[in-house]
Amino acid sequence: MTTILNYTNCEKIFESANTSIYRGKNKDNQPIILKMLREDYPTPEKLTHYRQEYEITRKNIEGVINTYSLEKYQNTLVMILEDFGGESLEQLIDKSIPPFSQEGGISISAFLPLAIQITDIFGKIHAADVIHKDINPSNIVYNPTTGQLKIIDFGIATVLPRENPTLKNPNQLEGTLTYLSPEQTGRMNRALDYRTDFYSLGVTFYQLLTQHLPFDNQDTMELVHCHLAKEPKSPHDLNPNIPKVISNIILKLLAKTAESRYQSTYCLKADLQECKANLARKFFTLGQQDFSDRLQLPQKLYGREHQIKTLLAAFDRTCQRQTEMMLVAGFSGIGKSSLVQEIYQPITKKRGYFISGKFDQLQRNVPYAAFVNAFADLVQQLLTENKAQLTEWKDKILKAVESNGQIIIELIPKVELIISKQPKVEDLPAKESQNRFHRVFQNFIKVFTQPKHPLVIFLDDLQWVDSASLKLMQLLMESSDIQALFLIGAYRDNEIDAAHSLFLTLEKIKKAKAVVNEISLRPLKLPHVKQLIADALHCDLGNAYELAELVYTKTGGNPLFINDFLKSLYDEKLLNLNVQQGHWQWNLQQIQARGFTENVVDLMVDNIQKLSVNTQQALKLAACIGNQFDITTLATVLNQTAQQTAADLRES
């Protein structure tokens, strides 16, 4: 027992990688929970996340643990929470406390009320515009005596309507990997919204009823691949006592795409209540009248089937020891990056590495900028691996670069964290120094281009490429001893002509008999726009036709502009949900009378100007930083807290 601040009898009851949890008493001798960051000197980023968690739990959402205060303690922060006498479902299972048996199982009659209660709380959480992102039995706390249940740990929760996870090493992912939705892995080419919680809820229900996880691989990359591509065994097949209809509810929650899961907690709760009321009923249609009251634009790619097939076929050839280059051309917003990201799933299956860099119009005088950013990302992925793997990478890199490791460190400083400090290299005349750099960098890249882990490098905005990067691209493609390398480049073909240095370099590469292919993306055709709108608004193709014609005319079939236009219709309340019929409806005359511009740039400018002054200012300065920025840097530029900066950006 210890004393923390003014709280006595504090006993540690749980410890994770980031936090320690204590149970104690306040000055009125009432039980409380203290949640403390473990680090003696937490980073500003972690403190910001901690304050964000505090703000989210202060929203007074029914069924969410009550938070009393956030207090400074030494060099860290302590969150003071209510203690209602509950324990996590994980602890109840381990201790075989009812409703869980000694085998850890739970009866159907006990499971259904619990599942309904959990679902009802998540309906309230989502209604408050919060996505939890880490649902699992350890974050669901239950008091078997009172029947009270609360959700805890909003450490990685978000109040954004959607997020775009980036591809990372599985060791870098936020959340608990065994419960993570496919899109939350960052390898799905899909944004993340509230429906990610449905998948994690499905894993939790699966575990409660079967005492097994859908996927429980020890290998993290294989586990990610299972979430992306493998179907779990039916709970009914694992335990015939689980009714098929309940088994089907869980499998619907575990659908790979968010569109195929439940769209609302309301409908999930209704199906669970139907099971509870009629346990003997063997089957009924799930998800009747299931729809979201928010406009959810489809995230699949329309009209790109042939291009996706071409891209994936090229990647397959790369996995067979070939080096290949693929160019993706098209206007801004046409979907070049979205197409390239379709490679995420197959590269996960092949245990490959995907890295990307972007050339900047205002940094064309900085040599190798996109390559440096790409390989800095790769090094960051490697640094999350275990000590044995890091030692193996160190040995491979040092063997490849020999005594020239400092050349790589000067280009990518974080490499030093893997290979340690290296001796200074000999000064050489400019030409010889350049040749040495090319040789060393090629050898460095060869470490990562192996059939057992192919390397995909995606270089975006090649219309702004620098001459040094073009030369390096040429050397990589012409090298006879580099294998399993897939170099993808994207550019805006309306911004360059045949005399551009990119095309001159490509001609040289082709003359050297290197494999270079190209995908040209054009605007969507009217049938594709019609299908997109029918899917987005849950109507048939016939009803979508006139609106599709209008959208097609206004946007020219550009996918980004189509989405922005539909969002504008929704924001202007020109799209309205018909709850009885379960689809969206609109008045074409009202939309036409609104007079939306056919210049999409004007439409986007208009949308930006509707934002608050603070949000516009934050976006302006963020754009000055570059095509990527972090909250801490932007907050420094704005001379305000990271918390305030995040609040300013949230509106956008």
Image: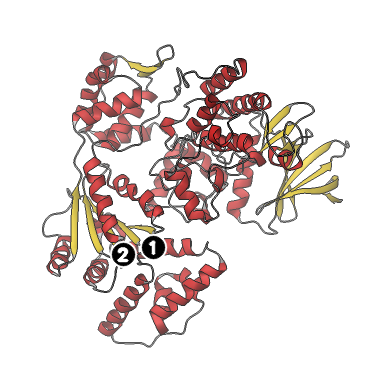
Q: Identify which residue, 423 or 115, lies in the foreground.
A: 115
State the separation of the CA atoms marked 1 and 2: 8 Å
Spot occupied by residue 107 in the image (x, y as percentages of width and height): 67, 28
Disc with the residue nearer the chain's start (1 vs 2): 1
Q: Which mark is residue 484?
A: 2
At 35% across and 23% down in the image, what residue appears? 537
Q: Identify which residue, 31 or 41, lies in the foreground.
A: 31
Q: Is residue 529 above or below residue 181?
A: above
Spot occupied by residue 278 in the image (x, y as percentages of width and height): 59, 15
Residue flagged by tag 2: what amino acid is it? Ala
At 25% across and 57% down in the image, what residue appears? 462
At 23% across and 56% down in the image, what residue appears? 326
Circle 1/circle 2 CB separation < 8 Å: yes
Spot occupied by residue 510 in the image (x, y as percentages of width and height): 14, 65
> Which corner quadrant of the image does residue 585 belong to?
top left
Q: Disc 1 marks which residue?
A: 453
